[in-house]
Image (cartoon, grey):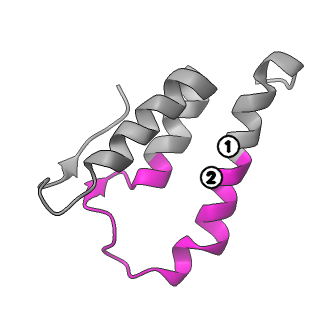
Amino acid sequence: MPFNWRTFPRWVLLVLIRGYQIVISPALPVDTCRFYPTCSHYGFQAIFKYGALKGGWMALKRIARCNPFNPGGLDPVP
């Protein structure tokens, strides 16, 4: 997907998520996320596929579901 100003917010969010995956995620325990794919991978895929607004909203909803009361499991990006 080529860069243009219309997709700039998408690229900013993707870079931030990738930075988190490279810098912060390796320092966390292995089984931190109860979902597959992990929340950061889900967010990356959703934003890449649907854009900053819709994909970002999907990622936020997914993070909100990640709590002790949710069993987790397989939850791919639609």
Q: Residue furthest top?
A: 6
Residue beneath the point at 47% across and 30% down: 57
Mark seen at residue 60: none
**Looking at the picture, does residue 50 appear above or below residue 45?**
above
Left or right of residue 71, residue 26 in this image: right
Residue beneath the point at 51% across and 28% down: 55
Q: Amino acid at mark 1?
A: Leu
Image quadrant holding the N terminus, namely: top right
- Viewer-side residue, 69 vs 47: 69
Q: Amino acid at mark 2?
A: Ile
**CB under 8 Å between callouts 1 and 2?**
yes
Is residue 36 rendered magenta in the image?
yes
SS label for mark 1: helix
Mark 1 is surrounded, within 10 Å at the Cα level, by few (under 14), some (14 to 19) or many (20 or more) other residues, namely: many
> Which residue does the numbered mark 2 point to in the structure image?
17
> Which residue does the numbered mark 1 point to in the structure image?
14
Q: Position of residue 72 (x, y in %)?
A: 18, 53
* Residue segment shown in magenta: 15-41
Location of residue 77 (image quadrant): top left
- Viewer-side residue, 22 vs 53: 53
How far apart are the two marked residues, 1 and 2, measured between alpha carbons?
A: 5 Å
Q: Position of residue 46 (x, y in %)?
A: 49, 32
Left or right of residue 6, residue 48 in this image: left
Residue beneath the point at 66% across and 55% down: 18
Q: Position of residue 75 (x, y in %)?
A: 26, 41
Image quadrant holding the C terminus, namely: top left
Left or right of residue 2, residue 9 in this image: left
